Image (cartoon, rainbow, N blue to C red):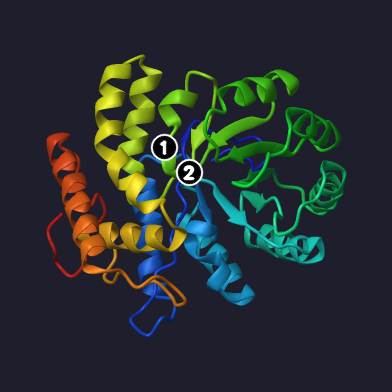
Amino acid sequence: MAKANEFRLNGIVPIIPTPFTVEEQIDWPSQPRLIDFACAAGACAMCLPAYASEFYKLSESERLRLVSEAVRHAAGRIPVFAQVNFVSVTQAVETAREAQKTGASAIAAAVPRMFALGEPDLYHYFDRLLSSIDIPLLIQDVNPSGPTVTARFVSELHRAHPHFRWIKLEEPMMSSKVTAILEATNGEVGVLEGWGGMYMLDLIPAGICGVMPGLAVSDLLAKVFQLTAKDDMVGAHKIHAAVLPQIVLSLQHMELFHHAEKRLLVARGILPEAVVRQLTLKLDRHTENRISFLNEQILALLDRLELPHNPIPTMAGQPH
């Protein structure tokens, strides 16, 4: 693998979910399977513990151990982004430094949006964070109730800290913003799309360098990304259209996403249990039935594409 400050992103960067036992303790023996799946799925990097990892339900020690175990098991196969989400920049700095010590390839940090803050205040936050680390930084900005950071903010922060290398945005109709950021930074800050990959076909032509979806459909979205690179937009659309209902259902609510994601990972033979740590949603039977139906469609799509349900060694002798 390239040195931490040299690697590039071009493809799928899945968020690794946190596996739990039925007692809601972290299922440490199952985490390596998720790492192996990300590598086998054609991901160009992985990220944890983020929103799709239920980071907000984890202790600080659990978060750091998840990162260190992921780094150890990935063993350089693909880069590992350590996500540090704190309103307090002091906590973000301390955790980012610890993650860097574990061998994380890069840091990811969400813009603190608990309260409305202007870009000068946000700049100060990320200036301190970037000044404390040597490895690259990815900034995630999701703000459903208002605007995300501007191209000017991205450009000025990158000019001061060249190891600010990527920004992840999760908003509709953002192709012009992608173009503006690439122009303002001469392409030196890559833009990734989140939101499950819902808008990826709109944004790949605009110049995004990657997508950060859930893990369970990452191999299918990697196939979509590869087909677009070959200018096979029709083939890419067919696969994306088949995955989209599952993405749309799950992103109605973050906790619904966890349930749908983990149930699909169980259906694929990658996780033994689909446990979501409390506090979470209690699903009604209609939602459970819909998740099951859509997960069956994903399995059928894998079969049509002749992709394995489970590309890693089987669990307790279960077939792929």
Q: Say what secondary structure mark 1 lies in.
A: loop
Taking the image as shown, residue 241 lies to the left or right of residue 56, namely left
98 or 73, which is in the foreground?
98
Q: Amino acid at mark 1?
A: Met
Snapshot quadrant of residue 171: top right
The label on residue 198 is 1
Say left or right for 206 vs 217: right
Residue 223: give x, y in percent of width and height.
32, 32
Residue marked by disc 2: 195
Horizontally, residue 90 falls left or right of residue 275, namely right
SS class, disc 2 = helix
Which one is in front, 211 or 319? 211
Q: Is residue 8 visible?
A: no
Residue 224 place in picture, x, y as percent: 34, 30
Q: Across the whole image, how many numbered discs are drawn on residues?
A: 2
What amino acid type should be assigned to the residue bearing mark 2?
Answer: Trp
Q: Relative to residue 269, is residue 44 depicted above or below?
A: above
Q: In the rendered image, which quarter is residue 267 located in?
A: bottom left
Residue at horizontal 69 percent and vertical 57 percent from the top = 100
Q: Quadrant of the rendered structure where residue 199 is?
A: top left
Q: Describe residue 80's horizontal placement relative to residue 94 as left or right.
A: left
